[in-house]
Structures are given as structure tokens and as C-alpha cells.
Image: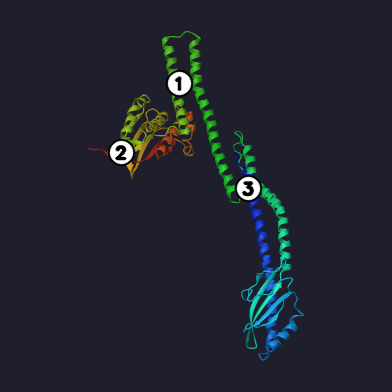
């Protein structure tokens, strides 16, 4: 079953709310009107009782029962005015009694609680309200019972109730219209956001949605979508940059390989000449292979499928092996590769292969940008549960304004671009990613013409080794 749209559901909710509110208002108005009419009747009967009490008090206690009956009959027979009256003395003798046989039977004793107005059964189709109260006059007590016709009140209530029922369809229609209007009004900002989002594609990812100063859910939605667009834009720019730079980096060695092979095939050459060409092709192939491996590593890292497998690693041994691995390369480049001795083994929690790759990146970077006759020094130290691995060289150095960017992908410092050994600009970004995956950090300190020092900081791990 297809669910209703948000607009339809909002319309139904608004309709139910306003329809219910309208009906409750009508019912409450009917009861309030009834209460007001009864209050008027009660006030009128209360005033009539006060009048009877004053009348009895004016005759004094010496008046006989017959005299009071005659006076009451003469006084209230004329001004009955639609009211029923029954007066009894404290002995239970009636002093006055009025009745309209065609409308109601005689009022029975105590037809209602004293001082309270209640309905009284009358001859159909009439309606009465009764009232009783004790009266004090001339040192005597009297019971005054009254009733009054409520036909006009009933008529007013019936007409009011009929009008309410006639207004019900109008209220329902208004509730539906108002609910639809309010639902559209509430969803218009969302519709505007949807319209703006649909216009955004891969060619205009820099476009941002309008923000609101209301600090409500719509403002939060707009800000969240803008943050998502910022991440998507960054990812797209990264992909475009990676594609453009990798194409450029791959095109250069492949063009060199093709050119050298084509020149070698133009005319016969000696074995030594072919060997020289093959060695150049091999060097370009090695460079291309390393670049492709770095690109694949970046792709795996970005896709989140190259998470490091952490285990205790004796970092001093790893650095020593890295120095041995690069000793021949350093000797070929006439560089002095040194490693500072450590007093005891130092352990970290990490991925062996990933840490080896990071060390290779830093040593390779030092070898590329250190002139013949220079030196490279590796060292490991521990201070306050932080392990520091340093790769220091006496190379060409890095300008201060470029040090904050050298860990960006494909970025190469100006001096690096001029060097014949310049790399692809991916090594340091890979090293930074690996270190960050180990909850560490990598920093650089450098001066132009004096060399550079790369420092990796990792959390120390206390290894438990059985004797």
C-alpha cells in the first residue's frame, strides 16, 4: 500500500485539528449558553424569594395563618407572571399555592435542594426549573418553593444547537481549506530547497542553498545539505585533480618510453646502445610502476578498503631494516645514511607493511632532494608514551610558505620541481594518511639550503614479553 505524501498527511492533521477544535467550541458554547440562561433564571427566582421574604416580614409575627393566606393570595395571584409559588410555614401549613394545571402538577414539597436550580417534570411539551429556599421573617421560618417556565430558554438552546449543526459542514470545509493552505505554507521552504537541489549537478557543485536565520529544522536542513554539498564538491575536485595529475604524471614516462623505443627502432644500433636504451626504459618503467602503486594505494585508502591491521611492532627494528634497505641506494647517490642507536627496544601498535611504506616515502624523499656528499639520519626516541621517528637530511630544504602544503596530493615545492629527481608529489600525502590511521601525526621542520627534518609521532605501546 502506497503511503500518503507529507503534504497530504499534514493537510489531514490540520483538518482533524481545526474540525475537532470547531466542534468542541460549538459544544462548549452550547453548554455555556445553557449555564448563562439557568443563571438568569436562578437570579430571577432568587429575587422573587427575597420579595416574598420581605412581604412576610412586613406583617409581623402576630399575623394569623388565615390573614397571611388572604394577603398572599391578594398579592401574588395578580403578579403570577409565569412563576409558580408555594409557601409553607415551619409547622408545614401552606400559606400560598399557585398552579397551572394545564402546564404542571402542583409543586411537591422540597422539589429541589435549597438554593439550587434543577429541572422539574412538567406536562409535555413544557419545561420548568424549580428552586427552594428557607426564609426568615418576624421570628418565624418559612419554606418558599418556586418554579418558572424555561420554555424560552429551551427554545433558545434548541435554535442554537440547530445553528451549530448547520455550521458543521461549513466548519469542515473551512478546516479542509485552511489545512491545505497551511500544509502548502509549511512545505513551501522545503519545495524551494528541493528545486534548488535539483539544479545542482557536477558542473555547478559550488552552488549553495539559501540559509535561514530562523534557527529551526528548515535552517538545520539547509545547513546540513550545504555541508554535504561541500563534501561532495571537495570529493569531485579531488577526483578531478587526481585524474588530471595522474594523467599528466603517467603521460610523461610513457611518452619517454615510447620515444626511446621508436628512436632505437629507427636504425640498427650496437648492443651497448640497445642496452643503454633498455636501462632508460627500465628506469622509466620503475618510476611509472611506483606512481601506479601510489595511485592504487590512494584509491584504496579513499574507498576505505585499506584499513591497517594493528599489532605490536618493534619500531627500532623496523627503522633499522629500512636503513639497510636504502643503504645501497644512498651509496649509489653518494649519500651518508646514518641511524642513531637506541638504548632499548621501543614498541608501537601498528601495521608493519603500512609503517614500512611510510618510512620508504620519507627516506625516498630525503634521497631525492639531498645533493651528493650530503647525509641522511634516522632516529627513534620515546618521551611520555609518545614515540618519535625522525628522518633528517642535509638537502635543499623547503621554503616556509610551502611547508604547509607539501602533504597535499601532487603538490611539489618549487625547489622540488627543479630537481631532476623530483617525484610525483604523492609520497608525503600517503605517509601522512598512514600516520593518521595509526592515531599519530607528522610534521616537518626545514630551512632552504640547510635541509629538512620529518618527524612522525605515534602512541607508545608497552609490550609484555615472557622471559
Q: Under tag 2, what secondary structure?
A: loop
Which residue: 44% across, 12% down? 274
Q: Find disc 2 in the rendering and name its residue.
A: 346
Which residue: 55% across, 42% down? 227
Horizontal side of residue 393 vs 114, given as left or right: left
**Residue 444 vertical placement versus 84 (above, below):** above
Q: Tell me the CA gap for discs 3 and 1.
A: 67 Å
The image shows residue 160 at horizontal and vertical percentages of 72, 62
The image shows residue 322 at horizontal and vertical percentages of 34, 30
Q: Find disc 3 in the rendering and name its residue.
A: 10
Q: Kindly identify which numbered label has been placed on residue 386.
A: none
Crowd band around label 2 with a 10 angstrom C-alpha radius: few (<14), some (14–19), many (20+): some
The image shows residue 295 at horizontal and vertical percentages of 47, 28
**Closer to us: mark 2 or mark 3?**
3
N-terminal of the pair, mark 2 or mark 3, is 3
N-terminal of the pair, mark 2 or mark 1, is 1
Amino acid at each position: 500500500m502506497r503511503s500518503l505524501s507529507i503534504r497530504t498527511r499534514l493537510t489531514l492533521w490540520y483538518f482533524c485539528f481545526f474540525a475537532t477544535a470547531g466542534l468542541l467550541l460549538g459544544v462548549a458554547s452550547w453548554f455555556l449558553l445553557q449555564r448563562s440562561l439557568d443563571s438568569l433564571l436562578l437570579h430571577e427566582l432568587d429575587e422573587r424569594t427575597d420579595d416574598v421574604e420581605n412581604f412576610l416580614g412586613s406583617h409581623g409575627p402576630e399575623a394569623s395563618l388565615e390573614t397571611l393566606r388572604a394577603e398572599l393570595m391578594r398579592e401574588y395571584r395578580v403578579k403570577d407572571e409565569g412563576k409558580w409559588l408555594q409557601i409553607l410555614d415551619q409547622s408545614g401549613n401552606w400559606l400560598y399555592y399557585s398552579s397551572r394545571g394545564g402546564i404542571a402538577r402542583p409543586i411537591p414539597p422540597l422539589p429541589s435542594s435549597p438554593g439550587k436550580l434543577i429541572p422539574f417534570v412538567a406536562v409535555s411539551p413544557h419545561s420548568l426549573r424549580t428552586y427552594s429556599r428557607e426564609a426568615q421573617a418576624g421570628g418565624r421560618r418559612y419554606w418558599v418553593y418556586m418554579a418558572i417556565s424555561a420554555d424560552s430558554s429551551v427554545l433558545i438552546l434548541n435554535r442554537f444547537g440547530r445553528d451549530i449543526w448547520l455550521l458543521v459542514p461549513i466548519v469542515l470545509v473551512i478546516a479542509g481549506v485552511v489545512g491545505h493552505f497551511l500544509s502548502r505554507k509549511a512545505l513551501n521552504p522545503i519545495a524551494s530547497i528541493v528545486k534548488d537541489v535539483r539544479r545542482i549537478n557536477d558542473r555547478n557543485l559550488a552552488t549553495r542553498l539559501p540559509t535561514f536565520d530562523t534557527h529551526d529544522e528548515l535552517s538545520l536542513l539547509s545547513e546540513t545539505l550545504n555541508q554535504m554539498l561541500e563534501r561532495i564538491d571537495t570529493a569531485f575536485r579531488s577526483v578531478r585533480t587526481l585524474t588530471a595529475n595522474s594523467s599528466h604524471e603517467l603521460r610523461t614516462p610513457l611518452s619517454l618510453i615510447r620515444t626511446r623505443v621508436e628512436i632505437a627502432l629507427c636504425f640498427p644500433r650496437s648492443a651497448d646502445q640497445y642496452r643503454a636504451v633498455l636501462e632508460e626504459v627500465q628506469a622509466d618503467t620503475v618510476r611509472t610502476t611506483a606512481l601506479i602503486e601510489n595511485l592504487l594505494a590512494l584509491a584504496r585508502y579513499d574507498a576505505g578498503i585499506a584499513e591497517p591491521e594493528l599489532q605490536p611492532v618493534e619500531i627500532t627494528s623496523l627503522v633499522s631494516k629500512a636503513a639497510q634497505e636504502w643503504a645501497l641506494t644512498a651509496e649509489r647517490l653518494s649519500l651518508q645514511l646514518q641511524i642513531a642507536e637506541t638504548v632499548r627496544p621501543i614498541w608501537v601498535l601498528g601495521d608493519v607493511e603500512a609503517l614500512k611504506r611510510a618510512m620508504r616515502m620519507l627516506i625516498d624523499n630525503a634521497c631525492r632532494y639531498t645533493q651528493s656528499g650530503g647525509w641522511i639520519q634516522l632516529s627513534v626516541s620515546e618521551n611520555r608514551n609518545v614515540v618519535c621517528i625522525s628522518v633528517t637530511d642535509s638537502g635543499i630544504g623547503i621554503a616556509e610558505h610551502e611547508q604547509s602544503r607539501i602533504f597535499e596530493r601532487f603538490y611539489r615545492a618549487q625547489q622540488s620541481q627543479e630537481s631532476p629527481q623530483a617525484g610525483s608529489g604523492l609520497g608525503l600525502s600517503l605517509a601522512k594518511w598512514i600516520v593518521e590511521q595509526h592515531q599519530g601525526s607528522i610534521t616537518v621542520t626545514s630551512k632552504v639550503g640547510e635541509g629538512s627534518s620529518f618527524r612522525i609521532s605515534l602512541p607508545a605501546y608497552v609490550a609484555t614479553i615472557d622471559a
